[in-house]
Image: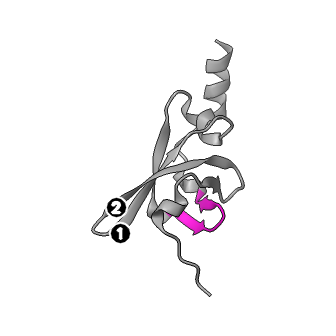
Amino acid sequence: MLKLLNVTDVYGMQVFTDAGDYFGDVEEAYLASNKISGWRIKATRNSFLTKILGGAKGVVVPHNMVKSVGDVMIISRAAIPAYDEEDSSVSESN
């Protein structure tokens, strides 16, 4: 049986990538023409998103990148902003 959720039920939900990385928490939904067009994901303390963005508060993930919503939200790894680990290690050492 299909379980329906209200948009407000998704607020605060944890977001993971399809590779299993904790990405952040759902903060807000963006609507266009009575449909969800995207999700604002908040960077939390121990999230992969904080590691990538540094001081930024979060990102907007297009709804077509969402793979599943249940107890947690699963997003495609393609939704992750470009990140180069070598660049972050250089900037952390300076």
Q: Is residue 23 above or below residue 65?
A: above
Q: Is residue 42 above or below residue 92?
A: below
- Determine the residue located farthest toward the top in the rendered image: 94
Indicate the quadrant where residue 74 lies: bottom right
Q: Is residue 72 above or below residue 51?
A: below
- Determine the residue located farthest toward the right in the rendered image: 20
Mark 1 crowdedness (10 Å alpha carbons): few <14, some 14-19, many ≥20: few
Identify the residue under disc 1: 35
Element assignment for label 2: strand
Residue range in magenta is: 65-76
Report the residue at 49% width, 35% height from top: 57
Instruction: Judge from the rendering whether residue 84 lies leftward or rightward of residue 42; answer left or right.
Output: right
Report the residue at 72% width, 55% height from top: 20
Q: Amino acid at mark 2?
A: Leu
Total labels drawn: 2
Indicate the quadrant where residue 45 lies: top right
Q: Amino acid at mark 1?
A: Lys
The residues bearing labels 2 and 1 have C-alpha atoms spaced at a distance of: 5 Å
**x and y, in percent, of residue 16 in the image:** 65, 54
- Image disc number at residue 31: 2
Report the residue at 34% width, 61% height from top: 31
- Determine the residue located farthest toward the bottom in the rendered image: 1
Q: Is residue 85 magenta?
A: no
Element assignment for label 1: strand
Q: Quadrant for the N terminus, please.
A: bottom right
Depth check, front residue: 8 or 1: 8
Report the residue at 63% width, 68% height from top: 70
Mark 2 crowdedness (10 Å alpha carbons): few <14, some 14-19, many ≥20: few
Q: Is residue 79 above or below residue 50?
A: below
